[in-house]
Image: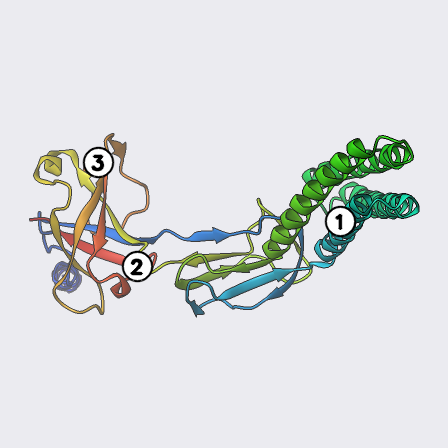
Amino acid sequence: MKIIPVIVLVFFAASCLPGQNEPARPDTLHGYAEGRVLYIAPLVSERLHVVSVKEGDTVKKGDPLFRLDDETGRQNLAAAQGALDAASARLDDLLAGGRPEDIRAAQAALKSAQAAYDLARATQKRSAALVARGQAPQARLDTDTAKLKEAAAAVRTQKARLALIRLPARADAIRAARNDVQIRKANFLAVQKALHNYAVAAPASGRIEAVLRRPGELAGPGQPVLSLLPPDEIRIRFFVPQARLASLQQDQKIALSCDGCAAGLSGHISFIAATAEFTPPVIYTRKDRQKLTFMVEVRPDMLRAFRPGQPVDVTLP
């Protein structure tokens, strides 16, 4: 008989726990903050040399983020500069009309083309070895193979032009030399521009969320080095039962609140899903929801008040 009051007392205490029988407000839904991060990757594939930031750092647009090993790029630029200088010298000699000088300039151009070919062949062999060990993508080997073929074609072209200079047809030689200078100049500018791709700066202001690769690892177009969260890419995502969907519209003001946040936070609806989906298995809620819901996103008026993954209460009008 003494056990019964204890059981009753325990049951009564459990029924009085905060939130156990507290009805959820019908105009309040529970969602979370989501950050739309930018994954920053280089335009060229090479080993990562320096990472200038760490996780949690705040950066401004244009700040340096990381730099790749640019030795190959500098060698390509030197080869392009040498080819351009040789082509320019050859054109000057042809315009001057000195027959021995014509031949010497053509020979210099051929030597430069041969050096470029040797460099391209060495680079292609190094890429083939890296691909065989799984340390470089196939795309790099394909690119270096194409450059090797281009360098071989340049050698053949220079040999043909050297033979052409020895012919009496001076006008044809000058015209070919001018074209060669234009081609070499365009190639030099392209290589010079590509060299800037080895150093990557912040495309927008924001916070470094994660550093995905460390110095010594391979990075490339499909291998981002870090993720950056711009301050204006925070959204509050929640799911609305289909019965309440008609009460919401684009740009509508919505009241927001979260643990430890200032009072009076709000935002405006930026997206309403066009199709329904089932309620996700993990959602910040205190009671079961209807199974059929529509995803809604709100852009907070005070972006810095929320962090990705933070639970947020959404009060519908």
Q: Which mark is residue 88?
A: 1
Instruction: Name the residue carrying label 2.
Output: 310
Q: Which residue is mark 3?
A: 293
Q: Where residue 9 appears, x then y in whole percent?
A: 13, 64
- Measured along the vertical axis of the image, is residue 39 above or below residue 173? below
Please give the name of the residue rendered at 16% of the width and 64% of the height, measured from the top-left corner: 6
Residue 181, horizontal then vertical, whole percent = 72, 44
- Residue drawn at point x = 72 percent, y = 40 percent: 178
Q: Residue at x 43, y 67 (%)?
A: 59
Looking at marks 1 and 3 on the same chain, the residue that comes earlier in the sequence is marked by 1
Q: Residues within 10 Å of mark 1 (few under 14, many from 20)?
A: many
Spatial separation of the CA atoms under disc 1 and disc 3: 69 Å
Q: Secondary structure at mark 2?
A: loop
Q: Nearer the viewer, mark 2 or mark 1?
A: 1
The correct choice, above or below, for 129 with respect to 18 in the image is above
Please say if 161 is above or below 12: above
Residue 289 shows in this picture: no
Label 3 vs 2, first from the N-terminus? 3
Which of 224 and 42 lies nearest the eye of the viewer?
42
- Residue type highlighted by circle 2: Gln
Q: What amino acid does circle 3 point to?
A: Thr
Quadrant (top left, top right, bottom left, bottom right) of the N terminus = bottom left
Q: Nearer the viewer, mark 1 or mark 3?
A: 1
Residue nearest the viewer, comparing 67 with 30:
67
Crowdedness near tag 2: few (<14), some (14–19) or many (≥20) residues, C-alpha within 10 Å: some
The quarter of the picture where residue 244 lies is: top left
